[in-house]
Amino acid sequence: MTFLKRPPRKNREVIILRRFSYLRPENLAEAAAARFDNGPGAYFLAGGTDLLVRNRHKTTDLGCAVDLGGIPGLDGIYLKDGQIFIGAMTRVAKIEKSDLVRSHIPMLADAAGLLGSPQVRNLATIGGNLCNGSPSADLTPPLIALGATLSVYSPRGGKTIGLEEFFLGPAQTILLPDEILTGIIIPLPPEGARFAFLKHSLKKSMDIALVNVAAMVSLSKSTCTGGKIVLGAAAPTPLRAKGAEAAISGTALDEENIIKAAEAAAGECSPISDLRCSAEYRRELVRVLVGRTLRSLRA
């Protein structure tokens, strides 16, 4: 029997990960101290689906990875006192498949199912997705529309932060280096609330959103009595489309008002041009997706 050898690949790229130190603290106080003591090159490690990729491509100067995986109490989904609590280290796949999430806030499960590939969802955490600070993150618009707040550990005392105020710009949040996101708190939606999430990307799966839209509205008969419309990848941070919300508030959710809301959203966003598409195309996507999202909530 003759075995054929595969010819060597020409110009094959050899990728060598840059060396970094690794710490696995046992509690939040140790984790906060470890990151603070190791300076600007220290980062908290959750699932690693963003941080380790950035280190590989040399876009992040990772000197020390402080792994949060050994700290108890950061993983889980439960309902208490009319609120759903999701631990910051909860895997995205777990959120996608959670019966509790699907029965009360299915929009979040839908968004989780569109994030990356199954392999990524099995590693990525909800806390890491938020703290990465990406304007195009899939989980952020649904969570803002649902009125989520964040539970944060700080050596100076715990605190709660509204998710809408969490982001300062691309890859920037209001967390200080020694502060740790521990959980996401989501109030149960009012009875009869309707929600929807839409994402448009160049590929059907495993791709970053060109634009994504989340909406939650309350209807009394055919009249919209309140709601939130949130845009992703349409501004430096996830954006509440308050002009669009005003266009449908107190009115019938009919075609005329939906068109007004879609036009308002397109007018108040501030997208950028990049390798994926132009700012003008993103603005048109906002108009189209807001319209489609609201139409899906009429039935």
Image: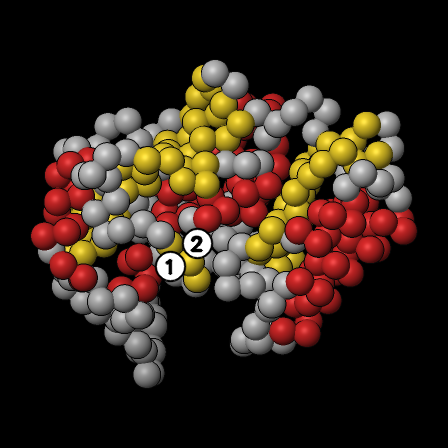
Give the x, y percent position of residue 92.
45, 40
Q: Quadrant of residue 231?
A: bottom right
Residue 172 is at least partly visible in this image: yes
Q: Is residue 50 above or below residue 184?
A: below
Q: Is residue 280 above or below residue 98?
A: below
Q: Is residue 216 above or below residue 203?
A: above
Q: CA distance from mark 1 to mark 2?
A: 6 Å
Q: Disc 1 or 2, which lies upstream in sequence?
A: 2
Residue at point 38%, 42% (across, down): 127
Q: Quadrant of the C terminus?
A: top right
For mark 1, give the secondary structure.
strand
Residue at point 9%, 52% (across, down): 37
Q: Which mark is residue 172?
A: 1
Q: Is residue 95 left or right of residue 289?
A: left
The amino acid type found where label 1 is placed reads Gln
**Depth check, front residue: 8 or 21:** 21
**Depth check, front residue: 34 or 4:** 34
Mark 2 — residue? 167
**Depth check, front residue: 274 or 250:** 250
The amino acid type found where label 2 is placed reads Phe
Q: Are marks 1 and 2 in contact (CB under 8 Å)?
A: yes
Q: Is residue 212 left or right of residue 177?
A: right
Residue at point 38%, 35% (across, down): 160
Give the x, y percent position of residue 187.
53, 27
**Depth check, front residue: 125 or 229:** 229
